[in-house]
Structures are given as structure tokens and as C-alpha cells.
């Protein structure tokens, strides 16, 4: 991974459940960390190859390794939101993570 390519500032979020004033539960998203990353849309060829395994994947996000990233999280980048589909420890060396993501537009999946 080339550090110079990590030019996008992202926010990693996890889903939390809280009690409201009526005793019911509400689900919200909480910021976990911010990081420098490379947000890289998949090309048509990569998308079709990835679709055979996982049709939800539209974007790769590369960042430095963090042990606390889970596929239940999401990524905010500016006004855009990406649902994390899978977390890949690149070469199993604990140096870089490749997040395979699906973009959400207005709360809905896109693509």
C-alpha cells in the first residue's frame, strides 16, 4: 500500500442500540474513528468479477490496518455512506485493510 494514495479522510461508524424515553429501542450510528484512506470505485471488469462472489460490492476502501474494523460497520466519506460488506487483511500481514463496500444513497443501497 502506498501511503501517498491515502488522501481521503473517512469516518468509521458502528451501529448502537439505545433506549428512548418510552423504554423502546432505537438504532443509531456512532463514530468509532477517523482515518486516511483510498476510496476506489471498482471498474466494470472488477465489478463483474466480484459480482460472481458478492453482488453487493461497488467500492474498495484501503486504509492502514486496524484490528477493530468489522463487516457490521459503515464508512462515511463526505456526504456519502458505504456499508462494509467484507474486511480483508491484505496478505495477512496486519499492515493494510481492504474494505469491500456497497454505497448507500438516501439510506438505500445503490447499484
Image (spheres, grey):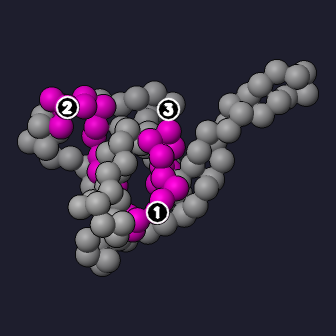
Rounded to the nearest whole Å, what is the CA distance between mark 3 and mark 2? 26 Å
Report the front residue among 95 and 40. Answer: 95
Residue 53 numbered tag: 2
Along the horizontal axis of the image, is 17 left or right of 54? right
Do callouts 2 and 1 mark residues in contact (Cβ within 8 Å)? no
Do callouts 1 and 3 mark residues in contact (Cβ within 8 Å)? no
Along the horizontal axis of the image, is 80 left or right of 24? left
Count of numbered labels shown in the rendering:
3
Report the front residue among 65 and 6. Answer: 65
Q: What residue would you read off at disc 3?
A: 106
Q: What residue would you read off at disc 1?
A: 66
Residue placed at 66% from the left, 47% from the top? Answer: 30
Please say whether residue 38 is visible from this viewpoint.
Answer: no
Name the residue furthest front.
92
Of labels 2 and 1, earlier in sequence is 2
Relative to 18, residue 67 above or below: below
Relative to 111, residue 87 above or below: below
Residue placed at 30% from the left, 31% from the top? Answer: 56
Coordinates of residue 104 in the picture (x, y in percent): 43, 35
Nearer the observer: mark 1 or 3; the answer is: 1
Residue 28 numbered tag: none
Along the horizontal axis of the image, is 6 left or right of 104? left
The magenta-colored residue range is 50-78
Amino acid at each position: 500500500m502506498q501511503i501517498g494514495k491515502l488522501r481521503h479522510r473517512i469516518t468509521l461508524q458502528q451501529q448502537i442500540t439505545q433506549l428512548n424515553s418510552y423504554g423502546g429501542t432505537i438504532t443509531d450510528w456512532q463514530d468509532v474513528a477517523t482515518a486516511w484512506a483510498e476510496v476506489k470505485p471498482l471498474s466494470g471488469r472488477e465489478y463483474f468479477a466480484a459480482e460472481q462472489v458478492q453482488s453487493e460490492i461497488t467500492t474498495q476502501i484501503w486504509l492502514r490496518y486496524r484490528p477493530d474494523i468489522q463487516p457490521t460497520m459503515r464508512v462515511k466519506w463526505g456526504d456519502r455512506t458505504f456499508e462494509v460488506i467484507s474486511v480483508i487483511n491484505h496478505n495477512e500481514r496486519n499492515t493494510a485493510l481492504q474494505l469491500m463496500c456497497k454505497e448507500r444513497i438516501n439510506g438505500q443501497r445503490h447499484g
